[in-house]
Amino acid sequence: SQKIEQNSEALNIQEGKTATLTCNYTNYSPAYLQWYRQDPGRGPVFLLLIRENEKEKRKERLKVTFDTTLKQSLFHITASQPADSATYLCALDPYSGYSTLTFGKGTMLLVSP
Amino acid sequence: DVKVTQSSRYLVKRTGEKVFLECVQDMDHENMFWYRQDPGLGLRLIYFSYDVKMKEKGDIPEGYSVSREKKERFSLILESASTNQTSMYLCASLMGAGANVLTFGAGSRLTVL
């Protein structure tokens, strides 16, 4: 069965450092991989997506990589700030017909001043 | 910006009560979704709808039903609430052509006593 894994342990880093979050998957061939941010008590908010034929995507301080051979995506936040503290979810998107996203359980990021 | 509005942010109900969770989106999207989110289990899809009066079961439809009488409104119904339905419920709308990027509502925190 399809499996998507994100590190369940919170990632603690210091302000100004680069945060790197990992998303691994098995038994799946997504056309896209998406990343969402979720603050406590709120709904997830879409951040970035990367296509299967793209290696890397950037948006301001965010960078996502996608390795379909390793079946892994890395999500980087450079020059992290306390305001970046949140839970980050990855989602696999098959983009075929009436398909739906498969979400990971998320990794909490804590950026301390 | 797309807005997905969930009418109730917090609800407290008793076991056996019928519960309605309402969701409205303002961007004429065809696709709408209901998820529940629980600690350690992540986001799980309950039901989704690709058009008015159409509905599809997600991964955990048992104990729930849905209604889509108008394009902008997607309701989740708990016919007889049980304590194991205490959860955060999230409604989402699909952004449109291309990747399946979701816009989520703020969530409805339901407690069943």
Image (spheres, rainbow, N blue to C red):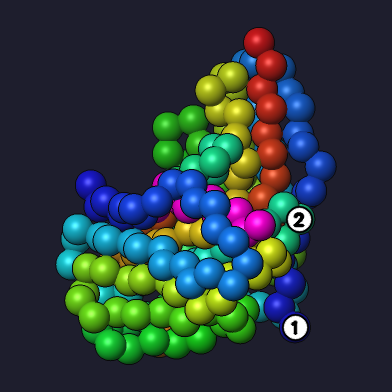
Kindly identify the residue that appears in the image at 40 percent across and 51 percent down. Answer: B8
Check contact, mark 2 vs mark 1: CB within 8 A: no
Instruction: Identify the secondary structure beneath mark 2.
Output: loop
Q: Which numbered disc covers residue B40?
A: 2
B2, B100: nearer the viewer: B2
Q: Classify B109 as above or below B27.
A: above
A37, B79: nearer the viewer: B79
Report the span colored magenta.
B105-113
Q: Which numbered disc covers residue A109?
A: none
Q: Chain of mark 1?
A: A
A58, A87: nearer the viewer: A87
Q: Position of residue B41 (x, y in %)?
A: 72, 61
Residue furthest out toward the right: A9
Kindly identify the residue that appears in the image at 54 percent across and 41 percent down. Answer: A41
User: Label 1 belongs to which residue?
Assistant: A1
**How packed is label 2: few (under 14 Cα within 10 Å), some, or many (20 or more)?**
few
- Residue B55's quadrant in the figure? bottom left
Kindly identify the residue that appears in the image at 20 percent across and 76 percent down. Answer: B70
A75 on left or right of A42: right
